[in-house]
Image: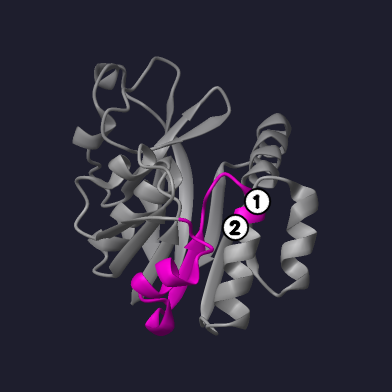
Amino acid sequence: MQIIIIGCGKVGSALADALIRQGHDVVIIESDTRLIQNADDLDCIKITGVPIDRDILKQAGIETADVLCAVTQNDNINIMVAQIASEIYNIPRIITRVFNPVSREAFEQFDLNTICSTDLTVQAFLRKIAGESQEQTHRIFDANILYTSAPIDQDLIGEDIANLTTDTGKLIFGLLRRGRLLLAVPGLKVLAGDEMVLADIQL
């Protein structure tokens, strides 16, 4: 699929890397010249510019895109880009990142798919407090992804997570550190007390 990602912070660059590995054609748009450097090692098109500028969106191929993911840290930018993609270019699938749960209601009024990191974090804490299983399943594109957390062998403390693999065939999605999810990006070191978050793709 042809996928446009708006935002090249930690989430945007990690998402782009994962999608490229799956064989998708990815284009990243980022207005901050410093953040776009997060994608220097990725085999995709990177465009520096304002994501709500139609010329920039056309340069990214929005007229033929299958999916647009708005993952900047600004809810207002995300919703504006999502509206443009939906109402002007009729992108088949639009997924937007939301920080403020109140903003999520506004997004959903426009029939936009949202992922609210604040809500996900709160729910994770509630499950942890209740002692429930740290296993979740999410539907993304055409696959179910099962997320589980697991303790880390003490021998792995200090290792770069990018160099680690599992014997189960599951992907290392990130680390759970003091209730906070850290995505698996090169340079992330395993610390004592971390839990590994694994992802199992079920087609």
Location of residue 107 (image quadrant): bottom right
Where does the magenta region start and end? 50-77
Residue 21: x and y, percent? 24, 60
Is residue 60 within the magenta segment? yes
Q: Is residue 125 above or below residue 36?
A: above
Query: In the picture, residue 40 is in which quadrant?
Result: top left
Q: Quadrant of the N terminus?
A: bottom left
Looking at the rendered image, the quarter that the C terminus falls into is: bottom left
> For the residues marked 2 and 1, what is the alpha-carbon distance in whole angstroms?
5 Å
User: Residue 181's x, y, as percent?
Assistant: 50, 35
Q: Residue at x 29, y 53 (%)?
A: 17
Residue at horizontal 54 percent and vertical 63 percent from the top: 52
Q: Is residue 118 left or right of residue 23?
A: right
Crowding at label 1, few (<14), some or many (≥20) Cα neighbours within 10 Å? some
Q: Residue at x 60, y 55 (%)?
A: 77
- Can residue 173 be seen by looking at this rendering? yes
- Is residue 104 positioned above or below 4 on the image? above
- Estimate the x, y position of residue 23 in percent, counting from the top left: 23, 69
Residue placed under numbered mark 1 in the picture: 75
* Residue tagged 2: 78
Q: Is residue 60 above or below residue 50?
A: below
Q: Whole-percent x and y of residue 8?
A: 40, 48
Q: Are marks 2 and 1 in contact (CB under 8 Å)?
A: yes
- Which amino acid type is shown beneath numbered disc 2? Asn
Residue drawn at point x = 19 percent, y = 34 percent: 163
Looking at the image, which is closer to me, 31 or 127?
Answer: 31
Assign a secondary structure to mark 2.
Answer: helix
Q: Amino acid at mark 1?
A: Asp
Query: Which of the colour schemes (rainbow, by chain, secondary structure, one colour) is used?
Result: one colour
